[in-house]
């Protein structure tokens, strides 16, 4: 039974097979290791991948791109509304669901994604050496495509993935960088040829294709040439873009990426010092400027990029699927790998500037164990003691006294006329669920320690 990993991104899809102790990406019929996540529809067929991407210029209104950004969303969702406004393919709400309207037919986003996975299935059949792969895969795909594609999906605790995906902006990616560059090229064409082509879908798609090639080149070269034959009204377009110019054009997008990383750290209660290694994944992680910005956030950590960023997720999924199948030991073939996770949210009670209670989630439910968190609690300087209270919750309803499971008191603090007490709280949760808490007054070094054992 084969172990496979499949990743559907906003712009590309990639598949890997784990065998003989290693995971390898399967190339598509064009020899490329990643396949454009693009589906083009016509009266007689659906085309997926590179051919669909290349035909966008002639078939733009019937070509679906970035379907991942709308999967599982409904009208009214800000990202869905943004997608609908920007999509060249008509998107409407029908029977309470968002659907693509193509040639008077209504197609669900899930069906579009299913076509992409069918394409990946065909690639995997070649990689596995079977006509119809029925292997197991460590893939989470919005609960779709598993049965119909004859691929058994092993579902590792979804909380692990939720921690990593909480409120991240999936719209920041390679397409956005390409679009920003294409808009700049349109301005250059208007300046030199006196024609504004921004309202011409065909011309803009030609620029998008050229900008996409240039963006990839700028990841390794200092400049790239953008040439489009007969861009508009028989006029050719030729422009050279330097890496510095590209970075300036996309400066706002780089800022959004940095903000998303910082926001995620805040949501999970981490600081940059808590991170030991950073794995770069996604095609945009090839951009040198973005790599440098990530390095600035985590100056002391190692950036892991020995594997091409757009291949990391499928390779990692294939390896984990191989582990789950017991590839290293045939005797473990039928056994499952269990990962201990926290069952509930663990929160620390504090007080905001207005005096109202404020709860900070330190361990979201589903956090892989063991885990360590630290948090600095601020208390009034005139207080001689500080009580720290810990609560647990399933995320339903407000906190109450019944939710409190532990408290720790720091006494005999030196009063401060001005300023606040800074109490550093370090929490370590072991695999068995027990919690070790250390509270230290940063000014005096006074410390209290408790251990909360798991209830039998």
Image (tube, helix red, strand yellow):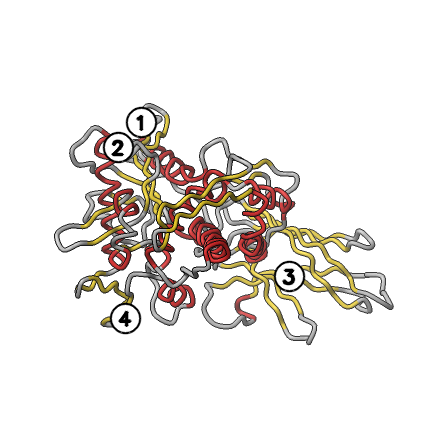
- 10 Å crowding of disc 2: few (<14), some (14-19), many (20+): many
Q: CA distance from mark 1 to mark 2?
A: 7 Å
Residue 442 in the image, given as x and y percentages of width and height: 78, 54
Q: Nearer the viewer, mark 2 or mark 3?
A: 2
Which residue is the site of mark 2? 2
Q: Is residue 356 visible?
A: yes
Which residue is the site of mark 1? 19
Residue 195 in the image, given as x and y percentages of width and height: 43, 60
**Residue in the image at 74% along x and 65% along y:** 379
**Residue at the far left in the pictured view:** 44
- At numbered mark 1, what does the secondary structure look like: helix, strand or loop? strand
Q: Earlier in the sequence, mark 2 or mark 4?
A: 2
Which residue is the site of mark 3? 407
The circle on residue 93 is 4
Residue 5 in the image, given as x and y percentages of width and height: 33, 38
Q: Nearer the viewer, mark 4 or mark 1?
A: 4
Image quarter in which the N terminus is found: top left
């Amino acid at each position: 039974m084969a172990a496979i990993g499949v990743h559907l991104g906003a712009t590309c899809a990639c598949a890997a097979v784990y065998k003989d102790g290693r995971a390898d990406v399967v190339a598509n019929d064009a020899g490329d290791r990643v396949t454009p996540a693009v589906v083009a529809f016509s009266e007689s067929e659906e085309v997926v991948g590179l051919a669909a991407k290349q035909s966008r210029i002639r078939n733009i209104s019937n070509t679906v791109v970035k379907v991942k950004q709308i999967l599982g969303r409904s009208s009214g969702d800000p990202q869905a509304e943004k997608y609908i406004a920007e999509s060249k393919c008509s998107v409407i709400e029908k029977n309470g669901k968002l659907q693509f309207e193509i040639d008077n037919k209504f197609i669900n986003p899930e069906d579009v994604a299913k076509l992409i996975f069918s394409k990946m299935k065909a690639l995997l059949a070649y990689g596995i050496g079977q006509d119809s792969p029925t292997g197991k895969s460590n893939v989470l795909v919005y609960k779709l495509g598993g049965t119909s594609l004859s691929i058994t999906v092993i579902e590792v605790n979804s909380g692990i993935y939720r921690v990593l995906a909480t409120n991240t902006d999936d719209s920041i990616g390679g397409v956005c960088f390409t679009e920003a560059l294409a808009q700049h090229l349109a301005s250059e064409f208007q300046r030199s040829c006196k024609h504004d082509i921004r309202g011409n879908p065909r011309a803009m798609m030609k620029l998008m294709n050229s900008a996409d090639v240039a963006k990839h080149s700028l990841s390794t070269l200092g400049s790239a040439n953008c040439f489009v034959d007969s861009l508009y009204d028989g006029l050719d377009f030729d422009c050279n873009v330097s890496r510095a110019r590209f970075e300036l054009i996309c400066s706002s997008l780089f800022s959004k990426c940095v903000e998303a990383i910082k926001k995620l750290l805040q949501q999970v209660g981490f600081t940059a010092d808590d991170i030991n290694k950073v794995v770069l994944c996604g095609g945009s992680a090839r951009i040198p400027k973005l790599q440098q910005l990530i390095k600035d956030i985590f100056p002391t950590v190692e950036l892991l990029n020995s594997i091409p960023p757009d291949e990391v997720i499928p390779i990692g999924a294939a390896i984990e699927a191989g582990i789950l199948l017991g590839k290293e030991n045939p005797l473990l073939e039928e056994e499952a790998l269990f990962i201990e996770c926290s069952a509930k949210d663990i929160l620390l009670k504090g007080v905001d500037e207005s005096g109202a209670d404020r709860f900070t989630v330190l361990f979201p439910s589903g956090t892989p164990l063991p885990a360590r968190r630290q948090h600095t609690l601020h208390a009034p300087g005139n207080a001689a003691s500080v009580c720290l209270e810990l609560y647990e919750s399933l995320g339903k309803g407000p906190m109450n006294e019944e939710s409190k499971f532990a408290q720790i008191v720091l006494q005999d603090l030196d009063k401060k006329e001005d300023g606040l007490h800074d109490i550093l709280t370090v929490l370590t949760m072991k695999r068995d669920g027990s919690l070790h808490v250390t509270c230290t007054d940063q000014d005096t070094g006074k410390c209290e320690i408790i251990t909360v054992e798991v209830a039998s």
